[in-house]
Amino acid sequence: MKNIMLSFLCLTAAIVISSCVNSLYPISENENDFIFREELLGNWADKGMQTQVIIKKATEKIYGVTIIDKLKNPGGKHIPVLDTSYYLGFMIELNGQQYVDCSVDISHPKYVSIAKDAGSALAPLHFIYKLSIIGNDKISITGINYDSLKKFIASYPNTVKYKDLKEGPLMLTAEAAGLQKNILTNEKAAFVFSEKNIVTRIK
């Protein structure tokens, strides 16, 4: 059951870019580190309008993020199927670069109904992205590439704490200080952030 739920959370965590790399711990547990940028609020979409991102203010420093993906109809018809996922996220800045930490909002009714009996067993997995605001109307979001991270781990085996699940994502297991030091601010690890996408504000 545990691996099934981890796989489920990986599959639902597709914030603009598909990623099967997550973290057991957040990139910061100090709310004083959190920054909130009002210009992120609004409706955004990728170039092909296949993914829509709705960003709202959940609390003073927390974003509520809704992702709506247009999926191909499994029946082979041309009518797309909309898949909606819900997240909570916060942002920090390290060495001039902004990072977003998102996790599935398991308090949302969609997930409460899916995992009602297993809710207490769900791991609060975190998904890490680099974020850059391009003017007023574009956001660049870059996630961790699974293959690139594996290469980094192979080159520096004692640097990254992780667990490679057989039926699920690669999970980083270092706490916030380790994530910041060994992944986020480590120049040798910069190449692992290569899953890039740009979304444009919907006016």
Image (cartoon, rainbow, N blue to C red):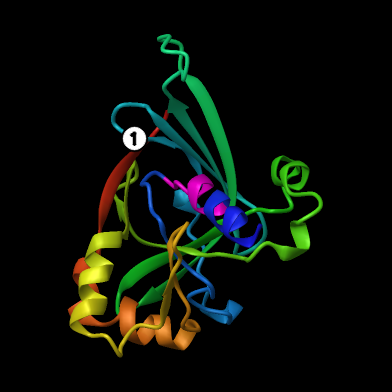
Picture quadrant of residue 16: top left
Q: Tell whether position 11 is magenta.
A: yes
Residue 187, position in %: x, y? Answer: 20, 80
Asked whether residue 88 appears in the rendered view, the answer is: no
Instruction: Say whether residue 87 is left or right of residue 171.
Output: right
- In this view, the residue farthest toward the right is 117
* Viewer-proximal residue among 36 and 176: 176
Three-letter residue code for mark 1:
Asp
Q: How many marks?
A: 1
| Picture quarter with the C terminus | top left
Residue 85, position in %: x, y? Answer: 57, 41
| Picture quarter with the N terminus | bottom right
Instruction: Say whether residue 151 is left or right of residue 91.
Output: left
Q: Tell whether position 125 is magenta.
A: no
Residue 200, position in %: x, y? Answer: 34, 37
- Element under disc 1: loop
Asked whether residue 188 appears in the rendered view, the answer is: yes
Rendered position, 178 above or below 142: below
Residue 48, position in %: x, y? Answer: 30, 27
* Viewer-proximal residue among 160 and 49: 160
Q: Give the residues drawn in magenta, as a range.
A: 9-15
| Residue on which the image places disc 1 | 46
Picture quadrant of residue 89: bottom right
Residue at screen point 45% across, 88% down = 177
Residue at screen point 76% across, 47% down = 112
Question: Badge 1, how many Cα within 10 Å: few under 14, some, many 20+?
Answer: some
* Viewer-proximal residue among 169 and 23: 169
Residue at screen point 68% across, 62% down = 122
